[in-house]
Amino acid sequence: MYWWMPLLWLVVTAGVIVLALWLHARRRARNLADAVPVAHSDRLTELPAYRTALARYRAALFGAVLVVSLVLVAAVLMSSRLVSISTYQPEMRNRDIVLCLDVSGSMVDYDAAIVRTFRDLVDNFDGERIGLVLFNASAVTYFPLTTDYRFVQEQLAYLENDLSSPLSDYEFINGTLLGEGSSLIGDGLGSCVLRFDDVDKERSRSIVLATDNYVAGRPILTLPEAGALATERSVRVYGINPGDVSSKEYIAEFANEMKQVVLATDGGYFALADPSAIPSIVDGIEQQQTTRLTGEPMLVRTDEPSWPFVLSVLGTALIMYFGWRLKR
């Protein structure tokens, strides 16, 4: 709001009021000039009842003029859009989290449920940077590390729909089929480890790895080698395995290998159906050392129409009241 706008409107309003009073005075003078003299009218005007009624009329008229002036001032203030200006410095934490999702054929029945788990997981964080990597034979960054949680939830919702819709165009597989074979778990985890920036700074780094650890190709890195890389870079890995169920004992060796690797990084291992998975992962990440950081200052402008609006509403009600009194 420009500083001179309220002043201009007040000057205009005052001019309108002065003009109205002048026109009223001129009309009254003309009416008096045309009036017919009545003898002994002072006897009527001296009556107590007349003087009381005249005083009430003048008070109501003065009140009406005053209230109309206040309503005009309130309207001027609302039209000039009063705002308050403040600065806000968002608070961030020095924790980075990469969600690492296996989108190979053996995971297709579980990925939508895992993405829903990721969405629930994100709801438990505030200020941490979060990114998402999809992998099969190769890995792609679905979105990089960011603190824009609205963007994160929008992207996860879009991915969940792409994974579960019968009309899906399978856009999520783009860029994930460039290796030898499929479901190269070690390469996927290694790629997720490399997605962290600022590796020399004191930032805690965590990966939430969702896979059944069913390898069907020739990876560059085995899963234990990728786990060693994570440990070397101080990255904790939390594993979510949808294949770890009693009805699939034939892949127990894959589940055991995955469990040993993630636990060696000081992370955690969970079955997808485990109700303690989300709270346990959140607790594990939040227990890591964190420092509250201050982001770039942001200028916030907030409309402040409240009291002019209330004044105009009350003033309108009073104008109706004074109109009723004057009519009587």
Image: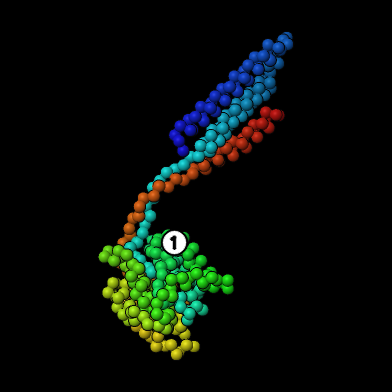
Q: How many neighbours does mark 1 have within 10 angstroms: few (below 14), some (14-19), or many (20 or more)?
A: some
Residue at x 44% of width, y 43% of height: 84
In percent of width and height, residue 273 lies at 48, 79
In percent of width and height, residue 193 lies at 34, 72
Q: Nearer the viewer, residue 209 or 46?
A: 209
Q: Nearer the viewer, residue 74 or 311?
A: 74
| Number of dots carrying numbers | 1
Q: Is residue 209 visible?
A: no
Q: Residue furthest bottom?
A: 250
Look at the picture and state if 103 lies above or below 315. below
Residue that label 1 marks: 149
Residue at x 59% of width, y 36% of height: 315
In percent of width and height, residue 2 lies at 45, 35
Q: Is residue 322 visible?
A: yes
| Identity, as a three-letter code, of the amino acid under mark 1 | Tyr
In percent of width and height, residue 244 lies at 44, 84
Quarter holding residue 142: bottom left
Residue at x 46% of width, y 38% of height: 1
What secondary structure is found at the residue carrying circle 1?
helix
Residue at x 40% of width, y 72% of height: 139
Quarter holding residue 99: bottom left
Look at the picture and state if 133 lies above or below 73. below
